[in-house]
Image: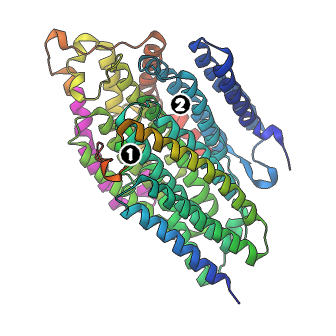
């Protein structure tokens, strides 16, 4: 029988993968967008797990909102990506170096 | 219960933003009409928000929406700052040939997100407000579509912003899991008297939430995006990001850290102290070597956010509110100066562009001087009182060593503000190269009012100050 802890471990792994992916990724901007989605999915898994094991529907409702917002966020992210590609003919993370923090 | 009267300003802004979008697409050819409609929306929202002061405190929509003094004050502050932003942006957008309708519609949607966030009563509305605030901002940064710098800044802002809200959201999901509640007040009640395991998971959640807030405020070490976005993005958008959105990051901190996790004060106070001191150090020291005005203002923002974090860490919300409101006014004036100096196809970015401004435009040199003195915290300007109340609150809270560090770093910071004044007044350049200051008349008037407000608020700070402390009384 799976317990809440098992699900939480999976979601924390997903979350860590997403964060680490954003930090160490040096190649492609699309991978960054995928990492962001991964973080949001980890959060969704968390919410579903808690909602299931607490017997509260609030968490499940929250997931619907996150899914909707994630779709909007992906749309804007890809739109920016298109602008970026048109302006510079490259979506390489290493080429994003005109502005030095 | 469903009490639609509580969200009347939000409904009004939403309807107006949608109408302006359609009107801009199909009906109105005249650009200034769009601009006037956007400004009318702000005035209308202001008029609808003021009567709500009679109804507070009020919980609507089963507690998801909360109206209190803080919510209404920050909403009114956001309207005023957005009014200035829209006014200053008009000239710039016209010069750079950016579509006006897009900027104003996105700006109104972002404002709507800020309004939702400031009166968020549950974890769900916090998240939705935050995303509704951020998503239009990502698009607004990209408005100058052909620029390489702008698209890079937009991508960095997007990735950083999405990462920040992801972290915040993970923290929120842990909070929900430990308490089983979404309404902030119920979360607060449920987090009293928890067992040790749950408490440590709550600690992790709070750490993630603090990281999210620090990202949004731009506190060190989560500040990397600020200089890039400020120098790369469309200046009209930076106006908005630097002033109004900081106001709501403050709301986010108060709602989550104080209203919800007040019991865990000892957990998050050290985090805010460290973030605050680091921001002061990096902000003030790195700003010393900047030659670009926008980057300089970016690092100055980081330093000022350090003060806000220290105010929050000392538990004095009134001081924090006073600081963030006055800082919003100063930030909007700072970037308005950058806009006022730019001409068609040319953006004034370097400090040396201000050389000899006193000879060509003495009045505006005087206004910029007021702004710089206020940012540096020189009495009798309002920046001095903002710093003063924060330091006072820190000493009362027993954080004297941190107050001393803050004072020393403010002195370091004064150097680069004074350098701008020196460039304007004492550096000379030949007559041809004197800076041209070409804003239109409404902008001249607004910039004058904006800058003279620093003097007026600095000479008579009592009313606003006691109001800010009354908000949390």
Q: Does residue B473 sit above or below B315 in this rendering?
A: above
> What x and y, as percent, mark residue B82?
55, 30
Q: Please tell me if label 1 and label 2 are on a single chain.
A: yes
**Mark 1 element type:** helix
Asked if the magenta segment contains residue B40, the reply would be no
Q: Mark 1 — residue?
A: B226
Mark 2 nearby-residue class (10 Å; few <14, some 14–19, many ≥20): many
Residue A68, percent across and down? 67, 52
- The local secondary structure at tag 2 comes to helix
As drawn, is B16 to the left or to the right of B132?
right
Badge 1 or badge 2: first in the primary sequence: 2
How many marks do you count on the picture? 2
Label 1 to label 2: alpha-carbon separation: 20 Å
Q: Eyeballing the image, is B261 above or below B199?
A: above
Q: Name the residue: 19% across, 14% down.
A: B433
Horizontally, is A31 left or right of B292 in the view? right
**Magenta segment:** B392-421
């Amino acid at each position: 029988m799976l317990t809440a802890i098992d699900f939480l471990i999976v979601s924390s792994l997903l979350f860590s993968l997403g964060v680490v992916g954003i930090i160490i990724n040096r190649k492609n901007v699309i991978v960054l967008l995928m990492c962001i989605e991964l973080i949001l999915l980890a959060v969704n898994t968390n919410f579903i797990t808690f909602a299931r094991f607490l017997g509260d529907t609030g968490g499940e409702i929250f997931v619907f909102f996150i899914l909707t917002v994630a779709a909007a966020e992906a749309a804007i992210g890809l739109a920016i990506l298109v602008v970026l590609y048109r302006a510079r003919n490259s979506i390489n993370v290493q080429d994003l170096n005109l502005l030095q923090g | 219960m469903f009490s639609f009267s509580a969200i009347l300003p939000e409904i009004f802004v939403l309807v107006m933003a949608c109408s302006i979008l359609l009107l801009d697409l199909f009906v109105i050819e005249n650009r200034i009409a769009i601009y006037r409609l956007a400004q009318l929306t702000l005035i209308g929202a202001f008029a609808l928000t003021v009567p709500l002061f009679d109804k507070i405190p009020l919980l609507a929509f089963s507690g998801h929406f909360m109206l209190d003094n803080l919510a209404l004050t920050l909403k009114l502050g956001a309207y005023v700052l957005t009014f200035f932003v829209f006014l200053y942006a008009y000239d710039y957008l016209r010069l750079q040939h950016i579509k006006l309708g897009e900027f104003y519609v996105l700006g109104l949607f972002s404002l709507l997100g800020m309004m939702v966030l400031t009166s968020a009563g549950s974890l769900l509305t916090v998240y939705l407000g935050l995303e509704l605030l951020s998503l239009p901002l990502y698009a607004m940064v990209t408005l100058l579509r052909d620029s390489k710098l702008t698209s890079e800044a937009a991508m960095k802002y997007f990735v950083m912003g999405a990462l920040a809200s992801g972290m915040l959201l993970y923290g929120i999901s842990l909070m929900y899991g430990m308490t089983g509640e979404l309404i902030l007040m119920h979360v607060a009640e449920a987090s009293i008297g928890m067992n040790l395991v749950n408490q440590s998971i709550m600690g992790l959640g709070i750490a993630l939430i603090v990281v999210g807030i620090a990202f949004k405020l731009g506190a060190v070490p989560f500040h990397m995006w600020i200089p890039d976005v400020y120098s790369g993005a469309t200046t009209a958008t930076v106006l908005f990001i630097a002033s109004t959105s900081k106001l709501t990051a403050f709301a986010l901190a108060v709602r989550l850290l104080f209203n919800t996790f007040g019991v865990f004060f000892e957990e998050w106070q050290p985090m805010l102290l460290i973030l605050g001191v680091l921001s002061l150090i990096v902000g003030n020291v790195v700003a010393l070597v900047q030659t670009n005005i926008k980057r300089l203002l970016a690092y100055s923002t980081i330093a000022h956010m350090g003060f806000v974090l220290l105010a929050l860490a000392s538990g004095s919300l009134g001081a924090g509110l006073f600081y963030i409101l006055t800082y919003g006014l100063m930030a909007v004036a700072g970037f308005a100066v950058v806009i006022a100096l730019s001409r068609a196809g040319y953006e004034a970015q370097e400090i040396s562009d201000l050389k000899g401004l006193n000879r060509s435009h003495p009045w505006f040199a005087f206004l910029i001087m007021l702004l710089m003195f206020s940012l540096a915290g020189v009495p009798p300007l309002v920046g001095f009182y903002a710093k003063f109340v924060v330091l006072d609150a820190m000493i009362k809270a027993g954080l004297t060593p941190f107050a001393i560090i803050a004072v020393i770093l403010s002195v370091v910071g004064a150097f680069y503000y004074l350098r701008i004044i020196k460039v304007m007044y004492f550096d000379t350049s030949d007559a041809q190269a004197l800076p041209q200051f070409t804003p239109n008349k409404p902008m001249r008037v607004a910039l004058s009012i904006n800058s003279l407000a620093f003097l007026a608020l600095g000479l008579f700070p009592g009313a606003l100050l006691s109001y800010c402390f009354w908000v949390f009384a």
